[in-house]
Image (cartoon, helix red, strand yellow):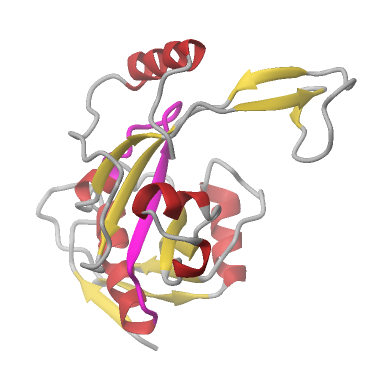
């Protein structure tokens, strides 16, 4: 089994040397699912999994899950690619660390090293990641060296009895349309033939709550970048 081994600090940016050294290896969908159910904010919500990688010390400390793009329109907006031109574009669909290990260097380390392993096993033209603007700014993707492409376009979801109605008609159904939290878009491009159409912007910084309020005001005004 292919592994990446290194020795960053397990708890932040200090100079402590962990024992044993950290390493990253492929894990199964079942292993990723069990870890994410405990440590990812989406809990047991089903997720797509093309490749999964685990960050190990004495135990499993983090998980990164990659899959193909969730919607073809992403590649159309990002690169102008038709549906039959979108092979080997990846999305970092899930990323989580064990409680107590967030806020340091391990998240960006896991992203960088897992992508290195992914590229050894599969063709990788680009990797896209999203950060829910209501929860965080995507600092881990900034630390991993991703390019920032702004916010996704405003969207709304239809709620019935407090839950999103995923499919089906909404006409005549008693419910409520609510703004969907917009997402920060991050991308790492490895194929030089790809021409990024998203704006390349400065990394968002500052108070997450203040920025979330600004995003909500933009939603109400109908502003925002297109996918």
Could you tell me how many numbered marks the image carries?
A: 0
Percent position of residue 12, x then y: 21, 47
Relative to 65, say whether 226 is above or below.
above
Percent position of residue 142, x then y: 23, 44
Of 164 and 33, the residue lying toward us: 164
Residue drawn 9% across and 54% down?
A: 15
Relative to 79, say whether 27 is above or below.
below
Query: From this viewpoint, is residue 111 visible?
Result: yes
185 in the magenta segment = no
Q: Quadrant of residue 189?
A: bottom left
Relative to 208, say whether 146 is above or below.
below
Of the 4 image quadrants, the one containing the N terminus is bottom left
Residue placed furthest toward the right: 172
Percent position of residue 196, x then y: 27, 52
Query: From this viewpoint, is residue 96 visible?
Result: no
Residue drawn 25% across and 59% down?
A: 109
Of 77 and 168, the residue lying toward us: 77
Of 37 and 188, the residue lying toward us: 188
134 in the magenta segment = yes
Q: In the rendered view, does 208 fall on the left or right side of 171?
A: left
Residue drawn 33% across and 63% down?
A: 126
Residue placed furthest toward the bottom: 1
Percent position of residue 3, x then y: 32, 81
Of the 4 image quadrants, the one containing the C terminus is top left
Residue placed furthest toward the left: 15
* Start-end of magenta stretch: 122-140
Q: In the rendered view, does 14 fall on the left or right side of 42?
A: left
């Amino acid at each position: 089994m292919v592994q990446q081994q290194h020795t960053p600090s397990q708890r932040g940016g200090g100079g402590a040397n962990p024992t044993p050294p950290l390493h990253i290896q492929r894990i199964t969908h079942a292993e990723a699912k069990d870890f994410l159910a405990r440590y990812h904010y989406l809990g047991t919500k089903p997720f797509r999994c093309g490749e999964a990688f685990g960050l190990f010390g004495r135990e499993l400390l983090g998980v990164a899950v990659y899959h193909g793009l969730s919607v073809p329109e992403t590649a159309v907006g990002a690169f102008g690619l038709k549906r039959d031109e979108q092979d080997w574009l990846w999305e970092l669909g899930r990323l989580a660390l064990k409680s107590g290990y967030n806020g340091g260097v391990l998240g960006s380390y896991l992203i960088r090293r897992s992508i290195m392993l992914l590229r050894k096993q599969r063709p990788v033209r680009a990797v896209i990641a999203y950060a829910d603007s209501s929860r965080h700014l995507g600092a881990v993707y900034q630390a991993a060296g991703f390019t920032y492409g702004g916010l996704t376009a405003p969207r709304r979801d239809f709620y019935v009895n407090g839950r999103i109605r995923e499919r089906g008609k909404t006409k005549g159904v008693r419910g409520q349309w609510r703004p969907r939290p917009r997402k920060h878009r991050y991308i790492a491009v490895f194929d030089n033939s790809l021409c990024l159409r998203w704006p390349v912007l400065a990394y968002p910084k500052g108070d997450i709550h203040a920025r979330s309020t600004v995003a909500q005001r933009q939603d109400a005004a109908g502003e925002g970048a297109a996918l």
